[in-house]
Amino acid sequence: MQNTFNFSAGPAMLPAEVMQQAQEELINWQDLGTSVMEVSHRGKPFIEVAEQAESDLRELLSIPSDYSVLFMHGGGRGQFSAVPLNIAGQNELSQHLVTGQWSVAAEEEARRFCQTQIIATSKEHEGKMYVPKQDEWTIAEESAYFHYCTNETVDGIEIDWVPRSTSGNVPVVADMSSNILSKPLNIEDYGLIYAGAQKNIGPSGLSLVIVRNELLGKERRDTPSIFNYGLQAKSGSMYNTPPTFSWYLAGLVFKWLKAQGGLSKMAETNLQKSQLLYSRIDESGFYNNNVRQDYRSKMNVTFKLRDESLNDSFLKQAEENGLVALKGHRSVGGMRASIYNAMPISGAQALVDFMKEFERKNG
């Protein structure tokens, strides 16, 4: 395992130190003689875990006191439904920036619960994908909310600027499933942030919601209680039994991030990893990335081989060298190296070294 680097897009690798601690505590957590999975979520030991996790997350992201933090079920797709149910009426409008598969899916799901409008999409120019700036489109002031995905894992597109309405009064909703905690944020730029846990937070099944309190209490009558933000906020995310083991592991990840130096340090490391890979791609005529440089993801580096008949050989030899889960999403093909927070620089360098050697032998 020490010689394996997991480039899976999600569920993704977790920090080795976190996995080691979880292993050591698995059957005897806090000397209770049980696993954290086997204790009551309403008992004092777990309540302390939950409160500490929220406290650490608030510190990492500098979350203001007028925002609630929710630990919920359902992953990111669950939030595709929860967002319109909580902050948009059936006849109200949600507007969407569509830049890849996940923002497409969010708009399609929102369409079940409110009126939707796609106001801009990613475009291609000279073979490179990019996102039009806001001088080409406008968020309507009457919108219940505006939605976008900050990082598209399938397409390798990341948006480093925050869209906003002219007045600043339309709530900005951001799906940050694949780049949350990878860099500092100004939380006040957003009305609501949500993220599936399985990339930079913890195991799949858990979702994180950070919501401005003024947006609570607007849910529709038919909103399921489990997805009711106001109800979950009042109950400390424990209206029902939460995914306790995932919450516990997320808390360990938050502590690990603090020990690494926080999000500014993570941003530096993530930039270094991505630059290693993009430099190899750009210096080579053997590999190609189809995203314009200012929109290239620092979490999901997508690329194709010039000769795609070599794809299977590339993947097979990569696995033999301990570089796993590099196959691109089935909808776009090619390769995808997901380099979330837990991926060390040595993993990115190992992939670069392999890419050089594979090109030498097959170029």
Image: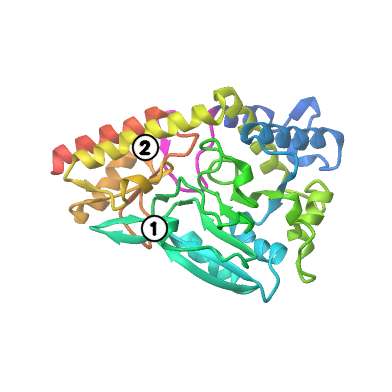
Which residue lies under the disc numbered 2?
274
For numbered disc 2, what is the local secondary structure? helix
Quarter holding the N terminus is top left
Quarter holding the C terminus is top left
Left or right side of 34 for 251: left
Residue 321 occupies quadrant:
top left
Residue 38 occupies quadrant:
top right
- Which range of residues does the magenta coloring cover? 1-16
Residue 146 occupies quadrant:
bottom right
For numbered disc 1, what is the local secondary structure? loop
User: For the point 34% across and 62% down, which residue is it?
Assistant: 123
Q: Does the segment drawn in magenta span residue 333?
A: no
The numbered mark at residue 334 is: none
Q: Does the segment drawn in magenta span residue 11?
A: yes
Q: Residue furthest front?
A: 167
Where residue 136 sits: x, y (%)? 41, 62
Type of secondary structure dominating the magenta stretch: loop
User: For the point 31% across and 33% down, which residue is it?
Assistant: 276
User: For the point 38% across and 63% down, which residue is it?
Assistant: 331
Is any atom of residue 111 visible in this view?
yes
Q: CA distance from mark 1 to mark 2?
A: 23 Å
The numbered mark at residue 132 is: 1
Q: Residue furthest bottom?
A: 91
Left or right side of 103 for 145: right
The mark that comes first in sequence, 1 or 2, is 1
Q: Amino acid at mark 2?
A: Ser
Q: Nearer the viewer, residue 151 or 124?
A: 124
How busy is the neighbourhood of tag 2: few (under 14 within 10 Å), some, or many (20 plus)?
A: many
Q: Nearer the viewer, residue 235 or 150?
A: 150
Where residue 236 sits: x, y (%)? 81, 46
